[in-house]
Amino acid sequence: MDTKNSAPDEPELAEPYLREVLGTAGLAVEYVRAEGNTLYLRGEDGGEIPIADFAGGYGSVLLGHNHPDIVQCARELLDAGTPVHAQFSRHPYANRLAAELNRIVHRELGTDEPYYAIFANTGAEAVEAAVKHAEMDRVMRIAALREELEHRAGAVRAAVAAGDATVPDRVRRRFGISTTEPVSAALDELAGHLTRENAAQLERPPLFLALEGGFHGKLGASVQLTHNEHYRSPFRGLAAQARFVPWDRPEALKEIHARERGVVFALTLSDGHVDVEEVEFPVFCAFLVEPVQGEGGIHVLTAGFADAIQRFCEEIGCPVVIDEIQSGMGRTGTLLASSQVGLRGDYYTLAKTLGGGIAKTSVMLVRQARYRREFEIVHSSTFAKDSFSCTVALKVLELLEADGGAAYLRAGERGAALRSMLESVRAAFPDQVKEVRGKGLMLGLEFHDQSGSASATIRGLAESGLFGYFLAGHLLREHRVRTFPTASAVNTLRFEPSLELSDDEIALLDAGLRDLCRLLRDGDGERLAGTAAG
């Protein structure tokens, strides 16, 4: 199949370097139509060439491209002149969407605690909203802590002034205060010492926790919570700082806490004696977790690790932000993939399929116990919460929930069929395929490192950082299958097709993957790179 679409003579100004990279890997094609699980490009004869889409808009089109019910909903909204720009007014459609999300979340979590909704346009924006809200909550908790420290100090001063309290020698010696100094002077010295100690803590910037391999976006704050160093390092000075937790070492949670924790000192009274109490300072702003890592290589969070995260965060008072942008909206068989491993979030972020492949929308949900209503005034988004995107999202939820949740069941069934095929490829080519991972219709196939290949061409591709893109280019060029590697694990191909995935398309991918494995086995680098003669 020839994937070299004709291009105009005008200069390439829209991300020209990316266009060049895609061209090198054989992925720079123009799709002219989309339907169900199929994208179409135009061949040299002007006819359409169908491509089985296993990339699925990076998880955005679980219901398929241009689902007829969603298209009809969008047409009706546009034909009716629905107001897209009606900011700072009542948005009953947004409230209905939030209520429906709550209904499903409550069912999956077994709770009735409300989750308030803040709408945005993209997944990264939803993450930014969660991070901002968590920091606002932390700042307000710090303000309350300051007041508590001042209140305690005032009560101690009053007791000393009234002659009802003294500063015992053990406290004086602890802070280097003379044991012969008068009580009032000793208290002043002690209070000054604690004020200086506390000032350094009270001004500490927030720290975030996230999992190694995690991806939470590429905006100012979210990029620093994404583990890939290549994405983070150019912007390290801009925003939030994170500590990354290894997947295989839950004990690292307590190690990080021991290194980074902060305390402030509070004056207290006990039986007429002044004492000093250590109070935990909220250094950790939030813990960000993907229940199934998308860009990190399709790794699934275990129930055991989920439980360790939940208990740890409860112990230190750190909110959990569950990033369901790729894994959510039914892709793994439930609205929230995290509900399957018993993880409950203080925040959830949802996007991609929420817009049905048409609307650009996302949402951040925050549970009532954490919610700060002041956030609604200091955070806003021009295009969020509009009639068009909210009503389309309601249609998406309606389709997911129809017939007793048949869509969730189909995601599980189609995912099982796809996984069975991938496992058979791995079994047939154990020297080429390392592992199959994932859940539902969010699966990954990891290839062994090929930097030791007998083929100089394959070695070069393996060392280029673009190995998975050349694998994807071969599948597109030779087998009319579209997929991509995961961004931070380029030896892993991702498969996130729609519910419309057919057995024929699975067979098409099967043939393509077996062909890939054979050329890797045989060292046929020219075919992989698309440079073979003929």
Image (cartoon, grey):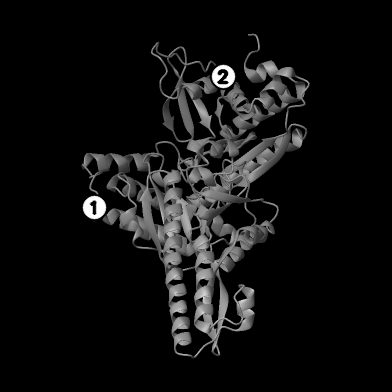
Q: Which mark is residue 210?
A: none
Q: Nearer the viewer, mark 2 or mark 1?
A: 1
Q: Residues within 10 Å of mark 1 (few under 14, many from 20)?
A: few
Identify which amino acid the numbered label 2 is placed on. Thr
Which quarter of the figure has residue 437? top right
Give the percent coordinates (x, y) of residue 510: 64, 32
In the rendered structure, the answer to whether residue 358 lies left or right of residue 321 reads: left
Q: Which sits in the foreground, 233 or 346?
A: 233
Vertical order, 208 against 382 (above or below) = below
Residue visible at 49% across and 76% down? Answer: 188
Work out whether residue 523 can be spotted.
yes
Indicate left or right for 382 with 134 as reference.
left
The answer for how far apart the CA atoms under marks 2 and 1 are is: 47 Å
State the residue at coordinates (45%, 45%).
123
Identity, as a three-letter code, of the amino acid under mark 1: Phe
Q: Secondary structure at mark 1?
A: loop
In the rendered image, residue 97, in percent from the top left (x then y), is placed at 35, 55
Residue position for label 2? 24
Q: Residues within 10 Å of mark 2 (few under 14, many from 20)?
A: some
Label 1, on which residue? 88
> Residue 268 at x, y = what percent?
52, 80
